[in-house]
């Protein structure tokens, strides 16, 4: 009896310990791979997702076959076991999946934390991934009683990074998390009265939460701000505001942050803010115009400011996994300028392309306003991924820099990939060819002629095993064929990082000091190339506003002669051209000769006048492109709406499955955007969407005309119609419930914003649209892509249609390819 009694006590203790346990670590699972292919293009295949959506995915068991491989081999499930750090490693799931299960004694809400994966299906629902392996992505999920299944999709680095998985049992329905902070510094001599801090709020309830406030107290000073809506069963990074104007002593200062709901504090956290010493590197935060999130940039200050002299601006872009503040700290403060380092939205972010490029431009604008640099002395440099960023931003915006200095950089994502792989450099079919055209803005090698106006200093270690020195030698050889102003340096024995001199190299700054940006009126020759006027359209006094063939390369090679009063040259793939005539005095008659066609004469009417020329077979006088046509503010492609404080609008109409898909897909994209891009998104149901409340904001629309009532409000006159079981594109009709499409179109009632549509003709079509590799930096998406659910299994042949709208946003004047 005593033994039985003791056993019962012991069993009760074990059960109590198990149910009171705060964290559950997954230790056993199954792995399978390779079985998917995602990358930096619109095409993807995923054999497991295909079976999941078709309802044919068998419950994984060790030794069972998921699919046949490329050589006819069996791709089988294999046992995987976590190591002592709770991490699953190995080749068993490279380019594949890890399958995990959890038997829950009841229906309950938990926080699922996975690391090292691109996304996950939790009981069939897509959820965001932690490709960075930071461990900050805490996903509120509802477990059902009994067996719960998780499929975590993993890229090709399973052996090295691996994945971890755990469950946390939350004690509060809404809470603060401070692992992923975006914080500023209190800086002597700068305004410190309104400093933004970014931190995460988690909602584990089944309904969106509105009306929250964040109350911040630091050194006795209190600030309160409203919190945007936190979606149901989701987390969102939001902004808290604090004042540090009264802090005068250098060092750390703890700020108390309280989350207020209904007038009561529901959670509290402490955030440390650094007050820097004069002359030290520091961080500043700002609210981004891309999505309204809190972002930061870092600064190595000008150490000898002279009110009579404007500083130079050294714009430095960091490498992968490098924080902007670490980038700034690699530079000793300069006595003739200020170093500013943007973030790329994350330490990996977007490879300085897409939203990384936009972050760089946003911070460049802030730096010009904040530090008032000499407009003739602005320079660009960076290391590793930032070396690529230097090559890319230098080629894309050559007029913005006096000189550039890439260090340990690679030129293109077609030759050097990262987590998301490489951009394909060739196409196997007309459909793939037209889709890859959307990646043309990433092709630095095609844009090297844009470096003509820049000084270029190339630096690389000759023993670099991470980014081969051959990339530097390649660019040296290319430049040597036409460039008259570049320097080349190989650091003997230098590895990828050989100390701070990898970036803070005195000869680079000596080289910079010799170079200035000329006044536009002093530039007599222009050679400028772009693949997308919506990304880059102008060079000095000339601009490319519309193309004859979308996303093919456009080029202008022009000469201006002030004495002869002439502009002449040749153009390629230009439909609308602008010329600023500020170099000529009012009343001057300017003769313009383009492409060996008949000369045109124009009498200058006013100072700083701009004229427009359009081309059909001949050049003729034109006007600026109206808002209803493609122009540099709104030119496509599909990614174009992911800016202008974008909002995700999900459909609630149709059946239960369609409305559930729209919400889950919008949440999945919001989670991915948060984690990849340190972002923050408003999720709005179509029934709650009033266009006037979201004026001129980019919209991502989830659903179709049958399921999303915002369609008619946003897409008036759109030549594309998508309803259940039918898709009409101009005069072409496609039928079936398994079709999906991504497309972009101007937002009705706005001259600047676009709508990016993620749509399908039924459940299978919607599910096929779940992938969101459009958030991969450099991935190319055309204006329109239509595909069937079978693409997940069979690839390119299941793309039904792809292409670009005409300059009038019509199908008829566009360029589309059908399969």
Image: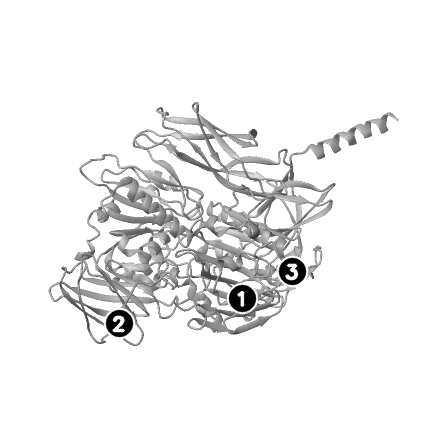
Label 1 SS: strand
Between discs 3 and 1, the one toward the N terminus: 3
Check disc 2: other Cα within 10 Å, few if <14, some if 14-19, many if 20+.
Answer: few
Q: Which mark is residue 659?
A: none
Residue under pointer 1: 721
C-alpha span from label 3 to label 1: 24 Å
Residue under pointer 2: 620
Look at the picture and state if 603 lies above or below 667: below
In the image, taking residue 788 as reference, residue 367 lies left or right, namely: left
Of residues 608 and 108, the one nearer the viewer is 608
Expressed as whole percent of the image width and height from the top left, the position of residue 769 reads 56, 60
Q: Which mark is residue 53?
A: 3
Look at the picture and state if 346 lies above or below 534: above
Marks 3, 1: nearer the viewer: 1
Q: Quadrant of residue 805?
A: bottom left
Expressed as whole percent of the image width and height from the top left, the position of residue 335 reads 23, 37
Label 2 SS: strand
Of residues 59 and 733, the one nearer the viewer is 733
Marks 2, 3: nearer the viewer: 2
Expressed as whole percent of the image width and height from the top left, the position of residue 155 reads 54, 54
Q: Quadrant of the N terminus?
A: top right
Of residues 366 and 122, the one nearer the viewer is 366
Between discs 2 and 3, the one toward the N terminus: 3
Residue under the image location 51 percent in, 50 percent down: 690
Of residues 283 and 719, the one nearer the viewer is 719
Q: Are marks 3 and 1 in contact (CB under 8 Å)?
A: no
In the image, taking residue 566 as reference, residue 97 lies left or right, namely: right
In the image, taking residue 456 as reference, residue 348 lies left or right, namely: right
Between discs 1 and 2, the one toward the N terminus: 2
Residue under the image location 26 percent in, 38 percent down: 334
Q: Does the image show residue 394? A: yes
Label 3 SS: helix
């Amino acid at each position: 009896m005593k033994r039985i009694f003791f056993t019962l006590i012991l069993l009760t203790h074990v059960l109590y310990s198990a149910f009171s346990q705060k964290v559950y670590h997954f230790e056993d699972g199954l792995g399978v791979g390779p079985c998917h292919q995602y990358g930096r293009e619109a095409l993807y295949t995923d054999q497991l997702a295909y079976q999941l959506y078709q309802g044919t995915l068998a419950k994984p068991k060790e030794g069972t076959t998921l699919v046949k491989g490329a050589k006819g081999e069996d791709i089988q499930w294999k046992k995987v076991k976590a190591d002592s750090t709770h991490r699953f490693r190995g080749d068993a799931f490279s380019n594949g999946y890890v399958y995990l299960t959890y038997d829950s004694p009841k229906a309950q809400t938990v926080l699922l934390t996975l690391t090292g994966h691109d996304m996950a299906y939790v009981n069939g629902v897509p959820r965001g991934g932690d490709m960075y392996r930071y461990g900050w992505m805490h996903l509120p999920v509802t477990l059902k009683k009994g067996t719960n299944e998780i499929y975590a999709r993993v890229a090709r680095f399973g052996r090295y990074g691996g994945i971890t998985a755990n469950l946390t049992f939350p004690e509060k329905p809404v809470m603060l998390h401070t692992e992923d902070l975006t914080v500023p510094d209190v800086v002597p001599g700068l305004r410190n009265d309104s400093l933004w801090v970014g931190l995460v709020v988690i909602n584990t309830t089944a309904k969106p939460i509105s009306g929250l406030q964040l109350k911040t107290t630091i050194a006795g000073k209190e600030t309160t701000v409203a919190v945007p809506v936190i979606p149901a069963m989701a987390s969102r990074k939001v902004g808290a505001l604090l004042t540090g104007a009264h802090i005068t002593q250098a060092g750390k200062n703890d700020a108390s942050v309280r989350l207020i709901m209904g007038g009561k504090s529901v959670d509290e956290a402490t955030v440390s803010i650094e007050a820097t010493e004069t002359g030290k590197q520091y961080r500043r935060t700002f609210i981004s115009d891309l999505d309204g999130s809190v972002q930061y940039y870092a600064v190595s200050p000008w150490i000898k400011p002279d009110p009579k002299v404007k500083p130079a601006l050294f714009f430095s872009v960091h490498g992968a996994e490098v924080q902007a503040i670490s980038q700034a700290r690699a530079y000793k403060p300069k006595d003739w300028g200020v170093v500013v380092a943007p973030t790329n939205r994350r330490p990996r972010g977007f490879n300085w392309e897409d939203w990384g490029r936009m972050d760089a431009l946003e911070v460049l604008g802030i730096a010009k306003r904040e530090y008032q640099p000499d407009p003739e002395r602005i320079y660009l440099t960076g290391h590793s991924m930032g070396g690529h960023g230097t090559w890319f931003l230098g080629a894309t915006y050559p007029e913005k820099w006096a000189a550039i200095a890439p260090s340990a950089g690679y030129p293109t994502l077609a030759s050097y990939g990262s987590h998301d792989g490489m951009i394909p450099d060739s196409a196997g079919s007309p459909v793939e060819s037209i889709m890859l055209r959307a990646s043309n803005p990433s092709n630095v090698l095609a844009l090297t002629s844009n470096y003509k106006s820049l000084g270029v200093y190339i630096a690389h270690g000759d023993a670099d095993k991470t980014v081969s020195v051959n990339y530097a030698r390649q660019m040296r050889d290319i430049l040597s064929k036409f460039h008259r102003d570049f320097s080349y340096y190989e650091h003997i024995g230098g590895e990828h990082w050989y100390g701070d001199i990898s970036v803070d190299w005195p000869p680079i700054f000596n080289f910079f000091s010799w170079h200035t940006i000329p006044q536009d009126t002093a530039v007599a020759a222009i050679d400028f190339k772009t693949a997308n006027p919506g990304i880059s359209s102008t060079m000095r006094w000339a601009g490319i506003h519309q193309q004859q063939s979308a996303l093919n390369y456009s080029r202008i090679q022009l000469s201006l002669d002030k004495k002869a009063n002439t502009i002449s040259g040749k153009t390629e793939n230009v439909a609308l051209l602008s010329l600023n005539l500020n170099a000529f005095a009012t009343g001057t008659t300017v003769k313009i000769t383009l492409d060996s066609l008949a000369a045109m004469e124009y009498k200058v009417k006013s100072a700083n006048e701009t004229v427009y020329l359009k081309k059909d077979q001949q050049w003729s006088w034109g006007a600026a492109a109206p808002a209803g046509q493609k122009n540099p503010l709104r030119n496509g492609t599909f990614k174009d709406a992911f800016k202008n404080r974008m909002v995700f609008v999900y459909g609630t109409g149709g059946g239960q499955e369609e409305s559930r898909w729209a919400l889950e897909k919008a949440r999945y994209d919001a989670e991915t955007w948060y984690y990849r891009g340190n972002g923050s998104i408003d999720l709005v149901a179509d029934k709650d969407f009033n266009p006037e409340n979201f004026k001129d904001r980019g919209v991502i629309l989830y659903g179709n005309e049958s399921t999303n009532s915002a369609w008619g409000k946003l897409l008036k006159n759109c030549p594309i119609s998508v309803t259940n079981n039918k898709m009409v594109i101009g005069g072409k009709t496609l039928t079936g419930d398994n079709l999906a499409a991504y497309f972009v179109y101007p937002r009705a009632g706005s001259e600047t914003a676009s709508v990016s549509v993620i749509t399908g003709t039924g459940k299978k079509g919607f599910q096929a649209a779940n992938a969101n590799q459009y958030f991969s930096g450099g991935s190319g998406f055309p204006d329109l892509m239509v595909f069937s659910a079978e693409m997940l299994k069979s690839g390119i042949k299941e793309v039904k249609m792809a292409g670009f709208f005409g300059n009038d946003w019509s199908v008829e004047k566009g360029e589309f390819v059908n399969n």
